[in-house]
Image (cartoon, rainbow, N blue to C red):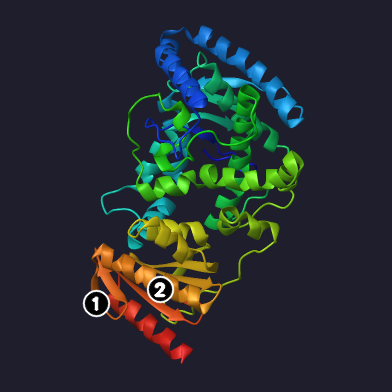
Amino acid sequence: MKFVLISPQPIDEEKPSRKFTAKRALTLFLTWSIIILVLSSLIVNTLHINESEEAYKAKVESLLKEAVKVFEAIRGFPLETVTVEVITIEWAKENWGKAYAEPDIANIRREETIYKALFMISESESLYEAKVEWWGMVISAVWMNKIYVVREYFNPSDKFNAMKILIHELTHIMQSNFSVPYTPTFDGEKARAALIEGDARLMEEAYINEIWKKAVKLPFATVKACEAYPEISFYGSEPCALPKSISRLNYFPYEYGLKFVKALYSRGGWETVNQAYLNPPTTTEQIIHPEKYLANETYKETKSPTINEEGWQVLKNERFGEYFIFVMLAEWIPDEEASKAAEGWGGDNFTYYVKGDNYLFTWNITWDSAADASEFFEAFKKMMRKVEAKEEDQNLWGKHGRYLSLIMEGDSTIIISSDDKTLVQNIVAEQAFSAG
């Protein structure tokens, strides 16, 4: 599900959800057309599983040749020879899931501690398992400039959806010609991925436009978490195995990226979209609010608070961004409230420390105004009430052996968390003293 231009990570198309939901009523004609497509796909969907490997691959290669012609006609961008490989779910899990997760297990465990300390995943959920499972949801991918399709999911007999998927992946092949730099923060990398995946999804819509002879627009529900691609929801009924917050974070480039690239397309067609690769978005805020990208509004540089405690080693510096804050809050309070509280984000600095087996992190978030800081402050306290953490002191909570405090200073809020309660209290006191 990620497209990586620099590092050799696979780029994938997520396995679609199996539950069809529509955000608004469609026209009667379009609705019946979709029903016919879905019913016909239900009939042929399992047939390709019993085909020989040679016959199956021949069908995929034939479709790919057609998809290349359609892509070049729509985008006006010539593609060199593109090849395809057929893989299985287990192959994807082993070679893209475990093969990348196992060498990175220390970082994954650290990330899991952060998510649990912020109450984004439950104590029983494993981030390692979620990362591996994510690759088990892959339907197709681009890796090392080659398209991979997962046999259990990719059905060449369902031409409409198979062509859409191939058009998506061919967009990633095209994107390898653009030098979009890797960004070393969560926020920046999600923004980069949103441009890449949003472009690929809009190309899917351009293909639909060719089929339906309508203006480029999304004819189905907007994707959300495991309800992605409802128009191809007939691959089964297996529920999403990912924690809700992880699912939301993973699907951000697909859902919000499409809206972002649509905003660019509406300003000047594919030329404007292509130009974005020369000046890529840098924050999830710019993706959520395209007008901020167009106005070149970026993030405020934010420093981590000074820690005077001895023996602590910095292992991670991060910027999480507006969308991460929204997802954190939305685990516990209504989406609308969470969105409003995250909207005033201006910048942030997350710093993670270790000392032996103990952890400490500080998260300094700068807001557009003191009023925005206050709005987040109140939303976070409401979240903590929903979490039912024990309030150890004013704005200091404890649960599952971890402690977390929240400070507000003007247009800034600072979250401090550790498994050492006294340490958190000392740092809070130091921050109050320095502010005074």
From this viewpoint, which residue is outermost toward the front?
28
Q: Quadrant of residue 183?
A: bottom right
| Front position among marks 2 and 1 | 2
Q: Position of residue 138 (x, y in %)?
A: 46, 31
Q: Quadrant of residue 71?
A: top right
Crowd rating for badge 1 (residues with CA inside 10 Å; few <14, some 14–19, many 20+): some
Residue depicted at 73% across the width and 41% down the height: 269
Kindly identify the amino acid type of the residue bearing the numbered disc 2: Phe
Crowd rating for badge 2 (residues with CA inside 10 Å; few <14, some 14–19, many 20+): many
Q: Is residue 251 left or right of residue 271?
A: left
- Numbered disc 1: secondary structure: strand
In the image, is residue 2 above or below residue 289? above
Residue depicted at 49% across the width and 71% down the height: 365
Q: Observer-nearest residue: 368 or 212?
A: 212
Q: Observer-nearest residue: 95 or 141?
A: 141
The residue beneath circle 1 is 392
In the image, is residue 187 above or below residue 275? below
Q: Position of residue 164 (x, y in %)?
A: 57, 26
Kindly identify the amino acid type of the residue bearing the numbered disc 1: Glu
Q: Position of residue 125 (x, y in %)?
A: 30, 48
Q: Observer-nearest residue: 36 or 47?
A: 36
Q: Observer-nearest residue: 394 or 258?
A: 258
- Numbered disc 2: secondary structure: helix
The residue beneath circle 2 is 377
In the image, is residue 157 above or below residue 78? above
From this viewpoint, which residue is outermost toward the bottom?
436
Q: Position of residue 43 (x, y in %)?
A: 40, 12
Measured in 3D between alpha carbons, the distance from the residue under mark 2 to the one under mark 1, in whole angstroms, is 18 Å
